[in-house]
Image (cartoon, rainbow, N blue to C red):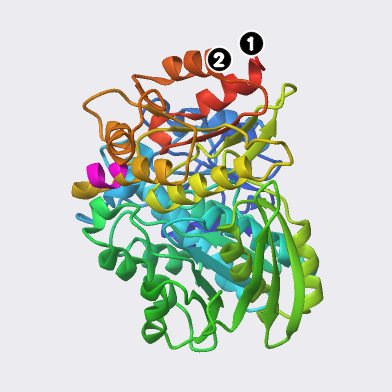
Amino acid sequence: MIELTLAEIAGIVGGRLHHADGGERVTGSVEFDSRQLTEGGLFVALPGQRVDGHDFAAQAVRAGAAGVLAAREVDAPAVIVPPLPEGMAHERALALTGDRDGSGAAVLAALAALARHVVTVLSRDALTVVGVTGSSGKTSTKDLIAQVLEPLGPTVAPPGSFNNELGHPWTALRADAGTRHLVLELSARGPGHIAELAAVAPPRIGVVLNVGSAHVGEFGSREGIAKAKGELVEALPAEGVAVLNVDDPLVAAMAARTTARVVGVGESAAATVRAENVTLDEHARASFRLLAPQGEADVTLQLVGEHHVGNALAAAAVALELGSPVADVARHLSAAQRRSARRMEVTTRADGVTVLNDSYNANPESMRAGLKTLASMASATQAAEPRRSWAVLGVMGELGADSVSAHDEIGRLAVRLNISRLVVVGGSGTDAAAMHHGASHEGSWGEESVLVPDTDAAIALLRDELRPGDVVLVKASKVAELWRVADALLEGGNA
């Protein structure tokens, strides 16, 4: 963050000083976890369901914090933020903090105001803000963009999927006077959420990847999702750039919703930055020819899955807009690594069993991509027979009225892709069970598909039946906690 006094912070957020003369200078990081504070930092006291950050205020200052951003008086130098006016407490913010009196939402509003001030100051100089949204692939694309921009100058991006009312301003406040690029991921669970996040850190470049079925339960339809995702391009200035996936009609249509210049990406001829001659190696890693108005070059990705081609094209478009030569973009994309955990994390055990841990989250589009990757890896072998493929799948959340049919379709796809075994975790009566029923109805499957009640049962089954050389995909929405299956398989080896 840029250096500010507590008095200046109070003015920015509309708060008042407490146990402070205002001259205390914040020179370190802004943190809501007191264990992460650096000398001269600002501690953000958030109330939660289990602990209240206000109880750690004095401890944070003793550990070196210059002051505290708080909703009530604490035994430490602090800026006390004003309560939100009636009706302004954001339900999503309340859900994040877990408090019911609105104090957490008030602190988050102040944090957002502070981030907006810092980004506005830095953007007057050399900072470029890049925003990324879409139904799937946001985190992987954000990581790719960061890696192709880092050679151009200091770059800040969030860890993992830190993309909500807390993670968004927290990440923005990592930027300082030396930062040249701020790459942010924007999520939404309702109309207006992306617009609110974009107002915290106004982007000059906005990337929209796709419109899928994730959160259709909240938005009602894919068209409703598209309306929300398009809030990002509406937030762009006229001198900005909208990077749109023209292979997705709902995304391509967003060109009419922005005054910014549009750069289309994809594999179709309509794309400005596009991929040709896409091939996959035996590990399902894509190679392609990158073509752009600035030139062309070959790219060989280290990331697993053909779906990363579109993510890479979006990253390439951003880097090209910021002045990177095509050859450098191709080289940096080819060297880029997976940075966020549980997203196509590929590990091969000593006995040759390969585990694809994609358990962080799931929706129908990412589930289809995961199954296609699994099928590709299992069939690409020099052995006499393909490797056995296992899909260990759990529930896909927030799909609304379409949930059962969406799960049914995934089960049927597993059969059509010739997946060897399907293990559905969730038990009878759950939406996940529809994957098992769909697979059973699609083909003449018997023991090829099995429905188990929980992760322990899935682990026991796999330990009994896996054999050397098998490939296992583990994927579900976060609520299913299927990473426990992947972790058990890797920690337990072939036991």
Residue drawn where x is 61% and y is 77% of the image: 274
Compare marks 2 and 1 and give the one earlier in the sequence: 2
The span shown in magenta is 403-408
* Rendered image quadrant of residue 385: top right
Q: Which residue is mark 1?
A: 495
Check the picture and name the quadrant holding the N terminus: bottom right
The Cα–Cα distance between marks 2 and 1, rounded to whole angstroms, is: 7 Å
Question: In the image, is residue 327 part of the stretch drawn in magenta?
Answer: no
Q: Which residue is mark 2?
A: 463
444 horizontally vs 171: left or right? left
Question: In the image, is residue 407 part of the stretch drawn in magenta?
Answer: yes
Indicate the secondary structure of the residue bearing disc 1: loop
Check the picture and name the quadrant holding the C terminus: top right
Q: Position of residue 223 (x, y in %)?
A: 27, 68
Q: Amino acid at mark 2?
A: Arg
Report crowding for label 1: few under 14, some 14 to 19, many 20 or more residues within 10 A (C-alpha): few
Residue drawn where x is 44% and y is 62% of the image: 134
**Contact, CB < 8 Å: mark 2 with mark 1?**
yes
- State the predominant SS element of the stretch in magenta: helix
